[in-house]
Amino acid sequence: MAIKNKFKFIRFIVIVAIIFYFIYYLFISYFVKQDKTFIAKYDLMYLENEYHGLIIRNEKTFFSDINGTIEYKINDGEVVKKGQIIAEIESLNKEKNETDDIKLDTNFENRKPEMLKELDDNIEKIKSKIVKAVNDNEVTEISILEEKLRLKLDLKDKLTNNKIKNFNLEEISNRNDVNESSNYFYSNYSGIVSKKFDGLEKTLTMSNLYLLDYNKIYKENINSITKNSGSIQKNENVYRIIDNYSYYIAYIIPFEDIRLFKNNLKNVKVEIEGIMYSASVYDCFENNTDGILVLELNQTFDNFYLSRKVENKIVSDKFKGLKIYNDAIVIKDGIKGVYKIGIGFDIEFVPVKVLSSADKFSIVEENYFYIYENDNRKKVMTINVNDEIVKNGDEYMNQNDF
């Protein structure tokens, strides 16, 4: 009888202890920790990052098919209608006015077979690495390699099936005969007319979108040449007609941001010279070690037809992600992260990647993100929705008492 009563007493003590534990955790712990932790939840914020890039315009370049003296009838940057007079040219050497055949620059198109071969080699190498990672049961490495493979296959598909017609071709301007010595150049299209040339009119085109090394072009010095009234040689550029209804900006972004723009965003705002412009995400793809974000805009900014390089903010519209307090973010051993309450109430440091910040809150990447170490891309696991995070990370790091 005494043994039985002792067993009941022990069982009673255990039950009371369990009940007390849950009461402590659900009530006392709540009131004590409510100002010290929070739960990571999905929320809407504006993503705001600054990138640099290159403007891609739809434009036609026209040149003279005769030697002569030219007088421009328009100002640079003037909007013209189709058929409007651009300039008058007086021939200096009538017998040499025959038009030579013009050979377009096709160097970039000729790069395509070489690029496709390189892509195929890389794809096969990645596939071999995936097989090895599967055999070695390296789950994290498999995920990284699969994403690399998807990007390579996506770029191959774009190169193979790119149907974008090259609008930016050089053309001989139509001329109306006035008399034996004078001719008028008139516009074949409506748009902005310009007498300035930077030499990239046939390079930065949509048909070359997947063939260019954007970082290399951006680092080069881009100088413009302005044409003025006076003597002009046969085959020399005369003017450009630029589409002022639609243009593109190819931004150079971190490789790991491809997933962000490709999967989550369709429309963004572009801030140029303090003015916000609406833009849509045309495409986002791999370009060597960078990513390229291509935005399409239908609103022009001042002198957009002269600019080639831009550096400005891109702000998303109602971007969804994990929202956390800014004061939760700390830097430990050079790594940005937060303290998370783990299983068994252990506190662990977890790296985070901030996508956008406001006064009190930030939106961070969830589940995982990538970093570079010695030119190698490494997958980093981060926080998830409903994780409990220490609110004041610096205070915890200094006191190490929670």
Image (tube, helix red, strand yellow):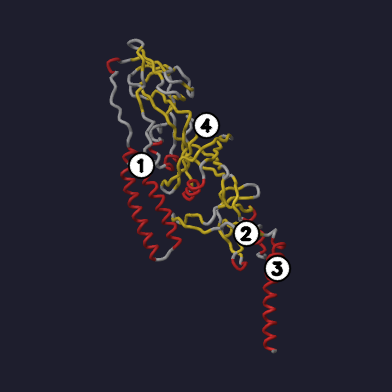
The amino acid marked with disc number 4 is Gln
* Badge 4: residue crowd in 10 Å (few <14, some 14–19, many ≥20): some
Residue with the mark numbered 2: 389
Where does residue 397 sit, x and y in percent of width and height?
64, 61
Lower position in the chain sequence, tag 1 or tag 3: 3
Q: In the picture provided, is 230 more to the left or to the right than 26?
A: left
Q: Which residue: 56% across, 49% down?
A: 355
Please tell me the numbered disc located at residue 299.
Answer: 4
Real-space Cα separation, disc 2 to disc 4, in angstroms: 43 Å
Residue with the mark numbered 1: 161
Residue with the mark numbered 3: 23
* Badge 3: residue crowd in 10 Å (few <14, some 14–19, many ≥20): few
Q: Nearer the viewer, residue 368 or 115?
A: 368
The amino acid marked with disc number 1 is Asn
SS label for mark 3: helix
Q: Is residue 200 above or below residue 6?
A: above
